[in-house]
Image (cartoon, rainbow, N blue to C red):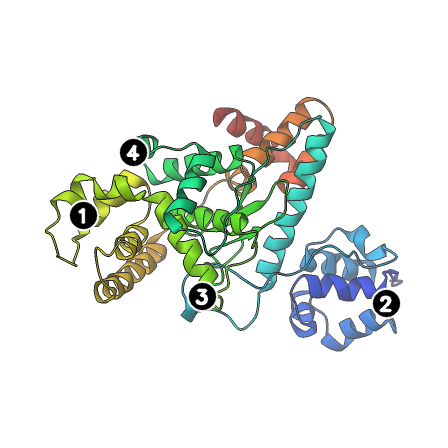
Amino acid sequence: MVRIEATPNPRVLAWARKSAGMSVEVAAKRASVKAEQLQAWEEGSSRPSIPQLRKLASTYRRPLAVFYLPEPPIRFQAMHDFRRLSPETVPPENSPELAFEIRRAYDRREWARELMADIEESPQSFDVRVTLGDDVEEAAGNLRESLHVSVAQQREWRTDYEAFKQWRLLLERAGMLTFQATDLELAEARGFSISVRPLPVVVANIKDAPRGRIFTLLHEATHIMLNEGGICDLHDAAVESFCNRVAGAALFPKEELLSSDVVRHHRRGERSWSQTELQEISRQFGGSREAALVRLLTLGLTDHVFYDRKREEFLRQYREQRNRAGGFAPPHVVALSSAGPLFTGLVMESFNRERITASDVSDYLQIRLKHLGDVQSEFAWNT
């Protein structure tokens, strides 16, 4: 059989690999070729076959046509700061999966802007700003005010998933895009943000618990207010501490928390809190037990000894829950959960107005055409 060579731009080949967060060795292994062979393609001293180029496109998650561009695109830049599960879980370098999730978030933001322009809509402007020197309670109050949320609303959200859904809708109505990373290990990143306006982006890891994702959304929203988008940097303790404290204060407003029955009936001066007390605070305000405990620590109602002990317990319980978790969601449900209501709404509105095709919907939502009917039904059910 005659081998038909492809003619990709060698510099674009190298760019695609690097922007995917892969070394030559890792990329070669995933594409089932020798590292020396891939290096030669990037140097232009030899060329891949068309099937080999298709394999590279799949490996890098790029359309085949991108390899024929005259110059590498100047667009995607990898981030350096993240919100992670804990400092001990930080891997030595960003994974290809993280690089893809960041790139996908950037792409979706650009597509959202284009879709809005095409249907003559303007994005909501999110203009709340804070600095590290601002009072945490005031910053949290400003965030809550911009979201138009009340504690009474929070108490109406009876399930974890309902609370997550409602916080997400509030953030999007305020002018942010909210996405969920689907292919990312929780140990690497719980979330990240893109602090550009209009339409700043906050991303939570779908593998996290719903209440953990709520805290991540608010933490990343604080990054947006600081104009410090990124993947939360554990080495910048001042920024991370501020974002954590604002997120906690936004979830558990001070006056309402202190006046709650749980706190009022807690024995004065007692630094330990029972599982039942933490669960009740969590239920009333929609944050995790750990987030509730952090808030109590911030307000001086517990101490670091108790917090450190309980946090280890929470992490152990969470790992056990993850190990027991089973089953999977249908592709169309995962696609809509990842894309979020605002972006999905723009795609479906454009499709209904016949501005884009069914194939475009498939590309935007990254789902096969055969699932389009399910996407339409699921979206209509949830709106």
The kind of secondary structure element at disc 1 is helix
Residue underneath mark 1: 277
Q: Residue at x 69, y 62 (%)?
A: 19
Residue 231 location, quadrant: bottom right
Depth check, front residue: 245 or 347: 245
- The reply to whether dot 4 and dot 2 touch (C-beta < 8 Å) is no
Q: Identify the element where label 2 is drawn.
A: loop
- Mark 2, residue position: 47
What type is the residue that disc 4 sits on? Arg
Q: Earlier in the sequence, mark 4 or mark 3?
A: 4
Label 4 or label 2, whichever comes before in sequence order: 2
Which residue is denoted by mark 4 in the rendering? Answer: 155
Residue in view at x 86 percent, y 67 percent: 47
Q: Earlier in the sequence, mark 2 or mark 1?
A: 2
What is the secondary structure assignment of the residue under circle 4? Answer: helix
Q: Nearer the viewer, mark 2 or mark 1?
A: 1
CA–CA distance in space, label 1 to label 4: 16 Å
Where does label 3 land, which residue?
237
The mark nearer the N terminus, 3 or 1, is: 3
Residue drawn at 57 percent across, 51 percent down: 227
Q: Amino acid at mark 1?
A: Glu
